Image (spheres, coloured by chain):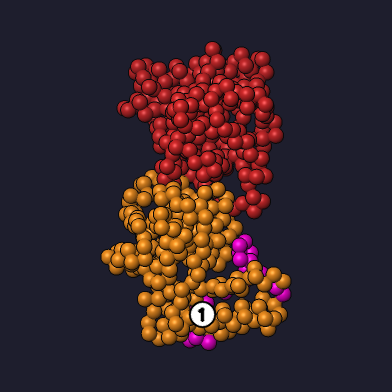
Chain colours: A red, B orange
Amino acid sequence: MGALHRGHTSLFDIARESAGPDGDVVATIFVNPTQFGPNEDFDAYPRQMKQDLDKCEAHGVDLVFTPEAASMYEGDASISIHEDAVSSSLCGSSRPGHFDGVCTVVAKLFNLTQPDAAVFGEKDFQQLAVIRRMVRDLDFPIKIIPGPTVREEDGLALSSRNAYLTPAEREQAPIIRKALLAAISGIADGGFGTVEEALLFARQTIEMASLAEIDYLEAFHHTSLIPLSGPVEEKAEVRIATAVFFGKTRLIDNIGIS
Amino acid sequence: MGALHRGHTSLFDIARESAGPDGDVVATIFVNPTQFGPNEDFDAYPRQMKQDLDKCEAHGVDLVFTPEAASMYEGDASISIHEDAVSSSLCGSSRPGHFDGVCTVVAKLFNLTQPDAAVFGEKDFQQLAVIRRMVRDLDFPIKIIPGPTVREEDGLALSSRNAYLTPAEREQAPIIRKALLAAISGIADGGFGTVEEALLFARQTIEMASLAEIDYLEAFHHTSLIPLSGPVEEKAEVRIATAVFFGKTRLIDNIGIS
């Protein structure tokens, strides 16, 4: 969606490495209207094409695809792709229709660019899981490569939406990472006996930040995204994700055991 | 879906011609469970793989893809493709979910076989229109080639389901073609001033067959499938389609002006 930061350019670097010297790296910059809800920030979403193109070039992107919405969607477009398991929790329940919009546009971009592999960031963990599911269930001949979340020095995950934060909000926002890290560490080392204990600790930690309001905070299986509870047996399969509002700005982050 | 007849083999011939001597023709034989409704004829649908493979070979098919349902659909499959304009009338309203099943399996087959072109019969005219819409809206890099309907000498459109007809039903079934032909001819030459008159005549003609029961009979725009009424200005854009039950057997046919 553009407004590129080091989180995005790290994905270009992974794609460049994966494609090898003879392969081509294609980046798409497209603020897709169909994945925004009616009260979301489509109009306000930052757009900075010139800087974005410079970053693409600096990170070895061979081709940038930057369509207009009018050329991507016919006026009487009537096809949509729906995912009804992985997308129903977490951001899917806060943002109805969002992942249908994501699936549909990503399928279009796959068909338009026909890549051998595609890189998606782990920061949007549910999006990654939904895309993996779509690739599996529609048999797209495309390898999905996850890109690790890139962070500020204080742990805040990079996001184009961080630019919306007031200085006071920005100062509190790293609590998200700290809370998730404490929760997952406690699960990994047995400090928390159950998922509920870990989530309660993380929730209380985030709520100590006066400007933070939790949208969701959940633990789930890393591929099915089915919620987990009770004692954890297969610790490598646990992922914890949260969405937190600071004012009108909604930040997401997640963490697993690896 | 197999049970191949001359209608299907005519599509192989078109594909063979289109692919040229260096191209490969792939046929898929797959009785897809997700496009049958709960009270439809999935179990009874005719299956005759040995004869089908012989026909494929005789018509220049290079490769036949005949997957098992269990290898096509994961137990927790959760992705579906929905079309909500072209598929809502005609067979779509009689068979809820049918075209979602068609779109989803065809998208999978497209991704598995990655053809340059794909041939679909005009007998399933709405299916052809829905597939064209999916290819357009999801940007599949595939040319869709329509195959004309193949008929018995008495005009009955070939269908695997014709085998279900009793001798008495089989004798009456050609009334479908006769009724559509009279209606479209009357529109083409001005004998009918309006679509309603033409449809009424076709309906009365079919109802003269004592064993026939009309499921639907409609006139519509040939690509949008939006119903037409009143006087017709762009006659080349009119298509008339019907579905008629003979006992439990449901036959479909359609006609345009060309």
Answer few, some or many: residues within 10 Å of disc 1's Cα (few below 14, many 20 plus, some between 14 and 19): many
Chain designation of label 1:
B
Location of the C terminus of chain B by quadrant is bottom right
Q: Is residue A112 above or below residue B66?
A: above
Question: Measured from the top left, where is residue B56 in percent x and y?
Answer: 34, 64
Question: Measured from the top left, where is residue B33 in percent x and y?
Answer: 38, 58
In this rendered view, identify the residue nearer to me: A174 or A118. Answer: A118
Tell me, yes or no, whether the highlighted magenta stretch contains residue B219. Answer: yes
The mark total stands at 1
Q: Which residue is mark 1?
A: B176
Q: Is residue B10 visible?
A: yes
Q: Is residue B169 visible?
A: no
Tell me, yes or no, whether the highlighted magenta stretch contains residue B253. Answer: no
Residue found at the far front of this picture: B21
SS assignment at label 1: helix
Determine the residue positioned at 32% across, 54% down.
Answer: B68
Residue found at the far left of this picture: B50
The span shown in magenta is B208-232
In this rendered view, identify the residue nearer to me: A200 or A75. Answer: A75
Q: Amino acid at mark 1?
A: Ile
Q: Left or right of B202: which side holds A238?
A: left
Question: Measured from the top left, where is residue A73 in percent x and y?
Answer: 63, 47
